[in-house]
Amino acid sequence: MTETQTLDTQDADPFVIGGEPFRSRLIVGTGKYANNEVMVDAIRASGADMVTVAVRRVDLDRTKEEAILHHLDPEEFFLLANTAGCYSAEDAIRYARLARAAGFNEWIKLEVIGDETTLLPDTQQTLEAAQVLVSEGFKVMAYTNDDLIMALRLEDAGCVAVMPLASPIGSGLGVVNPYFIREIKRRCEVPIIVDAGVGTASDACITMEQGVDGVLMNTALAAAEDPVAMATAMRHAILAGRHAFLAGRMPSREIAVPSSPSKGMLD
Amino acid sequence: MSSDIPGTKDAIQVRLNGKDREIQGGLNVRQLLESLDLHPRLVVVELNREILDRDRYASTLVGEGDQIELVHFVGGG
């Protein structure tokens, strides 16, 4: 066991979503990698045990390469299907049901987009879909805005996790509103997973320092020049941020305070 | 669902993954997947907007005008 692995989530700081324990607070996507070998290597390097997948039509001309299960072992990774690309509650519900019918689990990363340019979520449709899916027995992890009220409503609807964005999907802008993220974490009881917008290791670390339970990312790894190296960096960043949060940071102040004693100086 | 007589070999028109397609008549869903070289465990079938349970593939015939969606998991975030 490497030093990094010993730092991963342990009994003292368990990470549990919907009654299911996970080893890593980093959840990773499987999209946009240059090839499947790099994807699998990056996911392994990230230490993530939960990975997201999308539901799409089989391309009847070239099946083998695109089917993710030809490359990812569902025994090794916990598959979290998403409803990415859906613009209405009705579509998201349809995709979620198809995902469940694949036969792996009843979990869904619910995502209903409201705008093509920013890919910001349509939270009204998201809430509507969440209510239906929860009533059908799904464990819903809901992607949403960094909006406290909607986070509370999604929690009330029975979502097992609320997943506010750091910044728009694929933007790599990092956490644009740490205060809102902290407030959502303070007020919700379900795990808060920051989903989307993390660009590099410092973003992931700063996100975790807000006290959230985990981070979900895809493009930050897939679009890095070296996805495997970035995955390693992210793994450390998530752990560093988590530990820094638990450690409790010193108060920041805009004046200097000497670290060495002022007494005992020579005349 | 099909009104065709099981076993008929006449070609039928279906809408398969958004495209009009001519397929052999009389096929059940399991045979359709086999003819497309698809592993039943890696695919989810939606027939006329209803998800079809895997244990019904062999007993469900594909009929004229059916709308069939074959989906699977791909990379995504």
Image (cartoon, coloured by chain):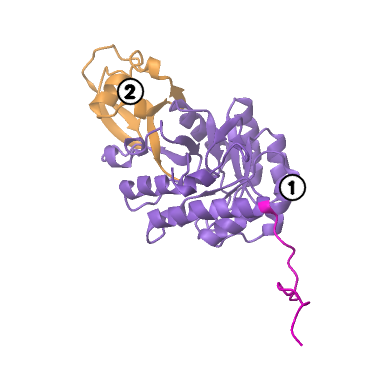
Residue at (51, 44) in percent of width and height: A6
Image quadrant where residue A69 sits = top left
Q: Residue at x 28, y 33 (%)?
A: B21
Residue position for label 1: A186
Labelled pair 1, 2 in contact (Cβ < 8 Å): no
Residue B60, x across and y down, in percent: 36, 16
Mark 2: few, some, or many residues within 10 Å (few <14, many ≥20)? some
At x 44%, y 46%, the residue is A2
User: What chain does mark 2 sit on?
Assistant: B
Q: Amino acid at mark 1?
A: Arg
The range drawn in magenta is A247-267
* Quarter-of-image position of residue A190: top right
Left or right, A63 with reference to A116: left
Chain identifier, colour orange:
B
Chain letter of the purple region: A
Q: Is residue A250 magenta?
A: yes
Of the numbered discs in the image, which one, if any, rests on residue A176? none
**For residue A40, what is the image quadrant?**
top left
Residue B4, position as x, y percentages in the image: 31, 15
Pointer 2: what residue?
Answer: B64
- Inspect this view and state whether residue A199 appears: no
Residue type of the residue flagged with mark 2: Glu
Which chain does tag 1 point to?
A
Instruction: Name the chief secondary structure element in magenta.
Output: loop
Q: Give left or right: position of A210 versus A96.
A: right
**Mark-to-mark CA distance, 1 and 2:** 57 Å
Secondary structure beneath label 2: loop
In the rendered view, does A253 fall on the left or right side of A82? right
> Could you tell me which quadrant the C terminus of chain A lies in?
bottom right
